[in-house]
Image (cartoon, helix red, strand yellow):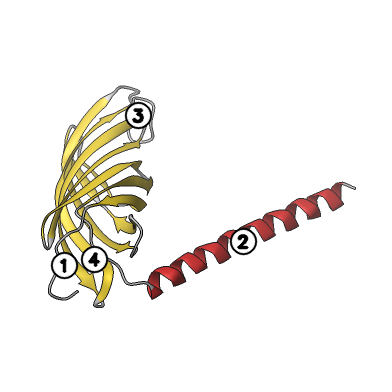
Amino acid sequence: MENTQDWLIFTQTFFSMKRILITFQCIVLFSVLCSAQNYKTGIGIRGGSQNGISVKHFVSEKGAIEAIVATRWQGFYAIGLYERIGTYFEVPGFTWAYGAGAHVGFLGGSNSRFDDNEDHTVAGADFLFGLEYKFQGAPISIGLDWKPQYDFIGDTYFVWDDAAFTVRLTFGNKKPSPQE
């Protein structure tokens, strides 16, 4: 009986995962087939090695500022970035971004970075490389980015593994670029 229950749990999990995968594939296909419109400001949730909230605001046709408040290592980071934006493969709504900025972090004592069990304040430089897609007719964008950072105040430490997926609710229309 125990083997039967294990098999039943396995098959239920497999088919649930299969449904999730099919749903995700449909969303990706739909997003590729739809054209998109730009936005002026977006606020969303960023999930990855640093989980948090992101606010992105376009300050020019090809420039944006982004503020992120994220948690990691039993503490939190406040991050500010300036990003250059461009269209990706001339697909409207599909953009790439690269940028740089700075952060300050307040980290808890009993985390994997420090062995002394004390609280630490760190600051340093951040870099960002990412892709984003804004859905047409819906106030939603999705993005994937890699954001390495280097602490040089409070500690000397390179964080290379900060990759995240962001879902934003968008507001306002940005003036379209000549390519769109």
Task: First in sequence, mark 2 or 3: give its number.
Answer: 2
Nearer to the camera, 81 or 35:
35
**Residue type for callout 4:** Trp
Residue at x 33%, y 65% (from the top left corner): 136
Mark 3, other Cα within 10 Å: few <14 / some 14–19 / many ≥20: few
Answer with left or right where residue 18 lies relative to residue 61.
Answer: right
Distance between the alpha carbons at the discs numbered 4 and 3:
38 Å
Q: Nearer the viewer, mark 2 or mark 3?
A: 2
Name the residue beneath numbered marker 2. 19
Label whose residue precedes the other's in the sequence (1 or 3): 3
Q: Residue at x 25, y 66 (%)?
A: 95
Give the label on residue 176, or none.
Answer: 1
Q: Quadrant of residue 62?
A: bottom left
> Does residue 41 sit above or below 177 in this rendering?
above
Crowdedness of circle 2 by 10 Å Cα count: few (<14), some, many (20+)? few
* Label 3 sits on residue: 115
Query: 172 or 45, which lies in front?
Result: 172
**Which secondary structure, mark 3?**
loop
Q: Given the image, on which type of amino acid does mark 3 rest?
A: Asp
Residue at figure coordinates x 30%, y 62% from the top left: 132
Circle 4 crowding by C-alpha within 10 Å: few under 14, some 14–19, many from 20: many
The answer to which of marks 2 and 1 sits earlier in the sequence is: 2
Q: Nearer the viewer, residue 90 or 125?
A: 90
Q: CA distance from mark 2 to mark 3?
A: 43 Å
94 up-or-down from 15: above or below? below
Residue 41, given in percent of the width and then of the height, sits at 21, 50
Read off the residue under disc 4: 96
Label 4 or label 3, whichever comes before in sequence order: 4
- Kindly report the distance in space between the C-alpha atoms of the residues bearing marks 4 and 2: 30 Å
Question: As drawn, is 166 to the left or to the right of 63?
Answer: right
Callout 2–callout 3 Cβ contact below 8 Å? no
